[in-house]
Image: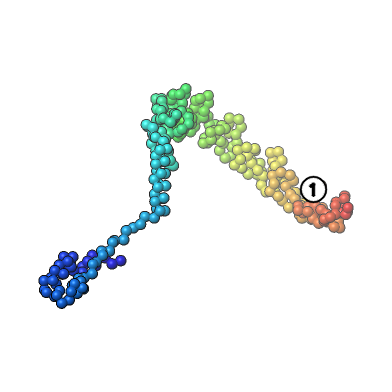
Amino acid sequence: MTDITQLWSTRPPPQDIWNAPAALLSSGENDSRGVGSIQAKVPPMITPLRPRTMSIRPVSIVVFLVALSGHVFAQGHSVEMPEHASAKRYGSGWECDPGYREVNGACIAVKVPADAYATRSSYGPGWECNWGYREVDESCVAVEVPPNAYLNASGSARWTCERGYRPVDGACTAIDVPANGYLTGDSYGTGWKCDRGYRADKDACVAVTVPTNGYLTDASHGSGWKCDRGYRADKDACVSITVPANGYLTDASYGSGWKCDRGYRAERGACVALKIPENAHLNYSGNDWECNEPYRRRQDSCTRN
């Protein structure tokens, strides 16, 4: 768009325009040319260009009015924040300050007993006891810790006995460790175990007698020993295992100590070859057989229904 100031700068000043007819008349040229010639000398009038104005669209007006009405509506329906309250850190609304709780839209002071502190919790009494205190009848009393004990890290009413002591009737009593025994960190049981080569017998640790062809174990129960491979326990001794033909040793601590090879089954201390009938095959264990589908076992044969 052409600047209006540029249009004015290309034309004579207004006073020169209006003074032009008078100058022509004074020169004496009007007698022969007439008025029409004088008018020809007058420059045409310039109509100043009006600057373009920004039009406000109806849509903009509607949006403005809707936003304004919403703001007024929100102000008219906003909930006034009571005393001793502050805006919530997340979301909208408000919440009572620590030491106060909401009652019928107001924040009422919480009665915090001695040795306690206020909480922001909206449930419960609104306070908790200090570390080392416990709640009793809406008050906080010091936790009584017996000798040779300490408060738990939570600081609640629970306490734990020092190592070498155990709780008995609200007190911590020393653990009596027998000879050839040692303390454990367990809070249950006797609180001690026997050294290797000894086993617990009531309140004492007695030496484990290991038979020939046997060895010590770390088990805290049982005899405290096991037999070497190829031997099995028989009362207080380890006896040799006799493995029949077509059999092999196992590591099981129970039973005969041996099993038959695949295709054989144990029978009276020996491994007997299996007789597999027609329409049958060895089962998963390999020490018996089963019928093929759709046959069914009948004594020592497979028959079809």
**Horizontal relation, residue 205 to residue 64: left or right:** right
User: Which residue, as the protein is rendered here, is positioned at the far top?
Assistant: 137
The image quadrant of residue 96 is top left
User: Which residue, as the protein is rendered here, is positioned at the far bottom?
Assistant: 32
**Horizontal relation, residue 142 to residue 231: left or right:** left
Q: Give residue 134's position: percent from left, percent from top.
A: 45, 27
Q: Is residue 289 above or below residue 135?
A: below
Residue 117, can we see it?
no
Three-letter code for the amino acid on which mark 1 is drawn: Gly
Residue at left offset 76%, top offset 53%: 284
Residue 109, can we see it?
yes
Q: Is residue 91 above or below residue 178?
A: below
Residue at left offset 30%, top offset 66%: 1
Residue at left offset 73%, top offset 52%: 248
Q: Give residue 210's position: percent from left, percent from top.
A: 64, 41
Q: Give residue 257's position: percent from left, percent from top.
A: 72, 47
The image quadrant of residue 83 is top left
Q: Give residue 277's position: percent from left, percent from top.
A: 86, 56
Judging depth in this view, the residue of 151 and 136 nearest the camera is 136
The residue that mark 1 highlights is: 269
Judging depth in this view, the residue of 45 and 94 nearest the camera is 45
Judging depth in this view, the residue of 75 and 45 nearest the camera is 45
Give the number of callouts. Answer: 1
Residue at left offset 13%, top offset 69%: 22
Query: How crowded is the residue under tag 1: few (<14 C-alpha within 10 Å), some, or many (20+)?
Result: few
Q: Is residue 135 above or below residue 62?
A: above
Judged from the image, the secondary structure of the residue bearing numbered disc 1 is loop
